[in-house]
Amino acid sequence: MELAPVRTLRLFLFVTAIIVTVPAAAQVGIGGGFGRSVGGVMIDAEGAVRAASIDEKQQLGKLLREAVKLPQGDLAEAAELRMVSLKGLQQAIRQHQASGEAIPEAIEFLAGLQRIEYVFVDTVNQDLVIAGPAEPWVLREDGSVVGKMSGNATLRLEDLIVAIRSVESARNGGISCSIEPTEEGRLRLQKLLRNVKLQPGQNPASLEPAMREAFGPQQVLLTGVPSDTHYARTLVAADFEMKRVAMNLVDSQVAGLSSYLQLAKNAGHGASHNPRWWMACNYDALTRSEDSLAWKISGQGVKTLTEQDIVNDDGSVTESGRVDKLAQKWADLMTEKYTELAQRMPVFGDLRNIIDMTVVATLIVQERLGERAGIDLAVLSGTEDAIELATYPAPKSIQPQCSFIRGRSGWVVTASGGVDVNAFSVVENQTTDNSIADVRQTALTRDDATRWWWNG
């Protein structure tokens, strides 16, 4: 008899800033509107996004805390290095499939991993092992799943699965997210601004409602990953929140990281030049042992880049290849403060986690580590129908999330942003250090061979 696939999640496909409706088939005792909001934003069945009310956020946070089981036993303790066997993980998933039970939090949150720092090839046990720091998970008031000690976002199984399954689709076009105004919106805004005449003493902020209406809804563009996954929503959410921090629409809560608009208030700006920011990979060279059986991933993971856009008369945009000094200063500040920002706003930690997992997935495929280990990642790669990811309405449009300031030479409109995940360039940058072979030997030593995770 064929067994039905086990869903990876029951309630955890939530992102700090972008929320989805829980499908009826998900094994959750929660219905209706509570499944549509977490951390500040709602998304409806048509993909339109709006801000969640304080009451909605509080209710959802309460429901999540009641539904999610906190770790017990050894998982309730932190570990400097925790190993997760991909072979054992797949076997555990198959066991839950056979029993018809929901996958437990320990699997959904990958034994509490906070980041992936190592990949080890275990040729003796025909296994691949990922390893990194781990903490017991807790839920914040907004529903974010974070480490109890650090407040860093916890890795999620569904993101690892999407990362592994998306390597080939990302090979040519990459993985990216962008929230963009439409050409029609830019054109309407240009026409409005040409007719604006501020009266003496008039605050330019008074014009922002009319400017937002002219700008109209912004479109969400995604490439490289399915748009109905938690991975994709993390991209959108992080992009959304980066723009809100840059535009002074939300406080970063990080000392020294003000908004771009605060930096640029009294500067001179060309009327047709506007800054864009995007987040990208930020890693040191991958370190491997001489036999390529041990790999180390290091670096902050994410950096912020910037460039000026030229808005043409017809509303289209041309990349200038130039950088505004103040926009670069803000990008550098966000990069410098990223680790603290990720603790204050966990969606940025979620973003770093999915980029870590994408680098690891790409490494496994590019270096054929599965073949070297003698392991078939059939469950995680989707060639074996043992696990089914829940799907959700994809985010398509966002009501104008843009701020405007009047510079000495014209209006500055900051509305564009994005995320660009190029894991192939990270994997291509390698160096050799055989000292990590010793780390591998120690890490692969375990007392209980039946356990799918253990501490070093």
Image (spheres, rainbow, N blue to C red):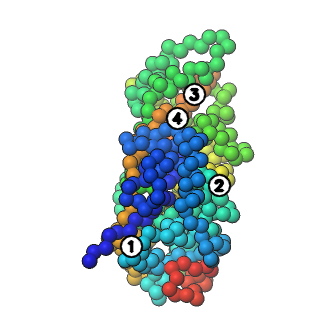
Q: Residue at x 49, y 49 (%)?
A: 34
Question: Seen from this angle, which residue lies furthest right?
Answer: 255
Asked which secondary structure carries label 1, the reply is loop
Name the one closer to the observer, 145 or 263. Answer: 145
Left or right: 39 with respect to 87? right
Q: CA distance from mark 4 to mark 2?
A: 23 Å
Camera-near label (3 vs 1) is 1
Q: CA distance from mark 3 to mark 1?
A: 54 Å
Q: Crowding at label 1, few (<14), some or many (≥20) Cα neighbours within 10 Å?
A: few
Label number found at residue 401: 4
**Type of amino acid under label 3:** Phe
Left or right: 167 with respect to 336? left
**Type of amino acid under label 4:** Gln
Q: CA distance from mark 4 to mark 3?
A: 10 Å
Camera-near label (2 vs 3) is 2
Tell me whether the residue at label 4 lies in contact with that at label 3, contact meaning CB atoms closer than 8 angstroms. Answer: no
Q: Residue at x 49, y 16 (%)?
A: 194
Q: CA distance from mark 2 to mark 1?
A: 36 Å
The residue at which mark 1 appears reads as 100
Q: CA distance from mark 4 to mark 1?
A: 44 Å
Left or right: 196 with respect to 332? left
Q: Who comes first in sequence, dot 2 or dot 1?
A: 1
Q: Residue at x 63, y 68 (%)?
A: 135
Can you give x and y, in whole percent of width and height, for residue 210 in the image?
A: 51, 21
Name the one closer to the observer, 47 or 63. Answer: 63
Q: Crowding at label 2, few (<14), some or many (≥20) Cα neighbours within 10 Å?
A: some
Tell me whether the residue at label 2 lies in contact with that at label 1, contact meaning CB atoms closer than 8 angstroms. Answer: no
Left or right: 131 with respect to 94? right
Q: Who comes first in sequence, dot 3 or dot 1?
A: 1
